[in-house]
Amino acid sequence: MTEERIRRMKDLPSTHLLGSGTPMCSGCGALEALHQIYDVLGEKTVFVNAAGCMTLLSVYPFTPFRGSWLYTAMASAPAGAQGVRDALDILVQRKRMPPEDDLDVVVLTGDGSAYGMGMSAASGAMDRNLDFLYICYDNEGYGNTGQQYSSATPHAALTSTSSRGYPGYKKDLFSIWAAHKPAYVATVIGSEPLDLARKIEKARDMQGPRMIIALSPCPTGWDYDPQESATIGKLAVKTGIWPLKEYIDGKVVHTRVPRQRQPVEDYLQLQGRFSHLFQPERDTTMIAEIQTRVDNYWDEVV
Ligand SMILES: Cc1ncc(C[n+]2csc(CCOP(=O)(O)OP(=O)(O)O)c2C)c(N)n1
Ligand code: SF4
Ligand SMILES: [Mg+2]
């Protein structure tokens, strides 16, 4: 790393991630959401990141953020966040750091950690009422290691470990978090930037455990042309597959209600991971099952 490169990195605007040189796939929905989230959170943040695609943003000793970055094992990000929060509190308490220099502690992990390996650490952090924001970018699989399924993978999706379609069902992380009665839980997506910004602002200004789950269209894992990312994100909302909602003050509120929902197949057929539902012949039964699950969800909540 040359001195000149170090200097240029330091001169980057405070609220922008590195625009070039990141090893992310083009059209990455996770990166799109993270850009927007960071624009709201700003530089007074310390990210505690568990292994996953976004880890590639940070090449020791540099990060594309103005704040700090701590890398943890997949299961441990919320435990790492506890250590960082405690250390910051002690520094302020002992007057070794002015309160205005304090940082917001932000966990950043994929679904593999948030829905699976890191669940126990997150549950413990909520029990201790840890003051932290957890951002899960949910690309519905283990992206970084070759698109294996996770417990966020939707039913019937092809992954490198479910070549006939994932037999399980996507875990309801939103409800699992809400059952802990934390300060805030919300779902977002980068293709709905106003809804996203409003929720991040709200979460930023609260204290206690807070969770943001960002559905993150992934051209590589979901197998579609990167230029379709925004379209697929919008269809996830318009078909009702990805409900935009928040848990606050003990209640769940839907922030967008797609009253005239598009059929789920409009979303499914754009993605190679569902291609076996349409070719060589249409799997009418499976498409109807997916549609029914979505319809039942909305029938219950509105
Ligand atoms: C305990 C453990 N098992 C496996 C790995 C290897 N590994 C690194 S990243 C990753 C995938 C993580 O998936 P996810 O959290 O969804 O993030 P994504 O890769 O999709 O961004 C795996 C399995 C690991 N780092 N630690
Ligand atoms: S595999 Fe998916 S989530 Fe990972 S960088 Fe590529 S597009 Fe983004
Ligand atoms: Mg993932």
Image (tube, grey):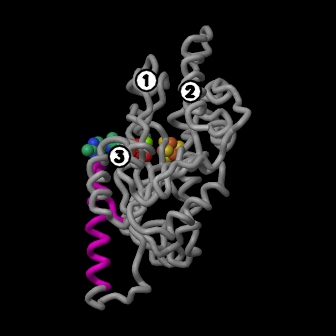
| Quadrant (top left, top right, bottom left, bottom right) of the N terminus | bottom left
Q: Amino acid at mark 3?
A: Ser
Question: Which of 116 and 143 lies nearest the eye of the viewer?
Answer: 116
Question: Which of 203 and 52 lies nearest the eye of the viewer?
Answer: 203
Residue 63 left/right relative to 21: left
| Earlier sequence position, callout 3 versus callout 2 | 3
The secondary structure type at the circle numbered 3 is helix
Picture quadrant where residue 90 is located:
bottom left
Span of residues in magenta: 70-92
**Vertical placement of residue 196 versus 84, above or below:** above
Q: Which residue is mark 1?
A: 166
Residue 123 shown in magenta: no
Judge the density around disc 3: few (<14), some (14-19), many (≥20) Cα neighbours within 10 Å. Answer: many
Q: Which residue is mark 2?
A: 296
Judge the density around disc 2: few (<14), some (14-19), many (≥20) Cα neighbours within 10 Å. Answer: few
Q: Residue at (47%, 37%) from the top-left corner?
A: 140
The secondary structure type at the circle numbered 1 is loop
Q: Are marks 1 and 2 in contact (CB under 8 Å)?
A: no
Mark number, residue 113: 3
